[in-house]
Image (spheres, helix red, strand yellow):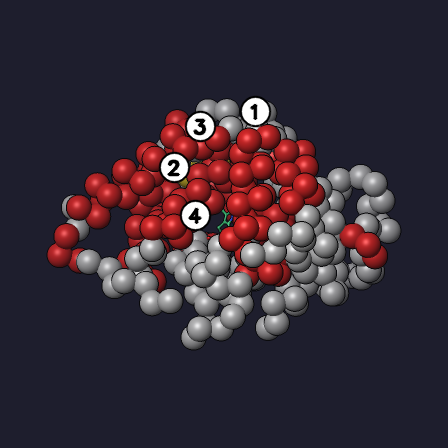
Amino acid sequence: MSSESSTNSSTNSHQHPKGSCPMTGKTFDFCPPQAGDSRSPCPALNALANHGYLPRDGKNIGPMDLVRGLKKGYHLSSVLAYILSFGSLFLLGQFRCMSLSDLARHNLIEHNASLVHDDDNNGAEYAPTSVDNTLLTALCSEGGKVLPNRMTLEDAALIRVKREKECGILDGVHAEIARGEIVIAIGVLGGKDAAKNGVKISALHEWMSNERLPVGWKPDHTQGLYQTYKMAKFVRERMREVRAQQPSDKPPVQSQ
Ligand code: HEM
Ligand SMILES: [Mg+2]
């Protein structure tokens, strides 16, 4: 599948000219990607495009579009939104604008050992952007170890260790990116007590499988940089402890 082709034909198939939708108009209602729309391996950004917080065609996205989308759609703090948006375009080497599918370029931001996406196929330039339902089911069934029906930071640490054991250990930068992804997802979708209580697994599943904001969910706090840093630090330390308990079972080092 080409990197541009993560489309989902709906019965009312239509186009998203200039990133707008004739069906939803100026609302932030959900509309799945249509033929020709560009999508990424990031459930968060795909969901923003599916709700019109980013151009619905997923194209011509500049850093300030990202900043505005992240703040409006997920209530990220300005500092966190700026760092993620400008940092990402810097890592991609695309300073003016991008299409969502550019984010699938392997080993820039995208990495192997993803939670719900298959590894890059034999050194392909672009990694898969479609969610692998088997991985998604596995992810959700690994949650709930601390609190029933909830995916906590502790669960996230165990799952990251497991994925890197299956696929190979990530280098430091990509390991940090991978932790950041699930931490921000738990923080934003789980609400203001997410560091302690995690997120409902059903909401995480709905968000990841349909790339749609969970029905009834609204941001209830501003997710800031320091809070995100502390949550990611917890996951990093727990991963280290868990790995230290399984020394004889060292995972292979990630091949690029
Ligand atoms: C400018 C902002 C962002 C950019 C450029 C970005 C980019 C990416 C990319 C390239 C990936 C693929 C990594 C991989 O799994 O190989 C990814 C995955 C992911 N992102 Fe984002 N992201 C952004 C913001 C966010 C936010 C705000 C959240 C949470 C609300 C989020 C949650 C995730 C999650 C959970 C994954 C993991 C998917 C998986 O492991 O299969 N991202 N992101
Ligand atoms: Mg990946």
Q: Image point 19% across, 58% down: which residue?
A: 250
Q: Disc 4 on helix, strand or loop?
A: helix
| Residue that mark 1 sits on | 221
Q: Are marks 2 and 1 in contact (CB under 8 Å)?
A: no
Mark 4 residue CB less than 8 A from any atom of ligand 1:
yes
As drawn, 69 above or below 20 = above
- Considering only order in the chain, which callout, 1 or 2, is on the residue closer to the N terminus? 1
Image-based side of 98 in relation to 90, left or right: right
- Considering only order in the chain, which callout, 2 or 4, is on the residue closer to the N terminus? 4
| Residue that mark 2 sits on | 232
**Amino acid type indicated by mark 1:** His
| Residue that mark 4 sits on | 177
As drawn, 93 above or below 150 = below
Mark toward the viewer: 3 or 1: 3
**Amino acid type indicated by mark 2:** Ala
The CA distance from mark 1 to mark 4 is: 22 Å
Q: Disc 1 on helix, strand or loop?
A: loop
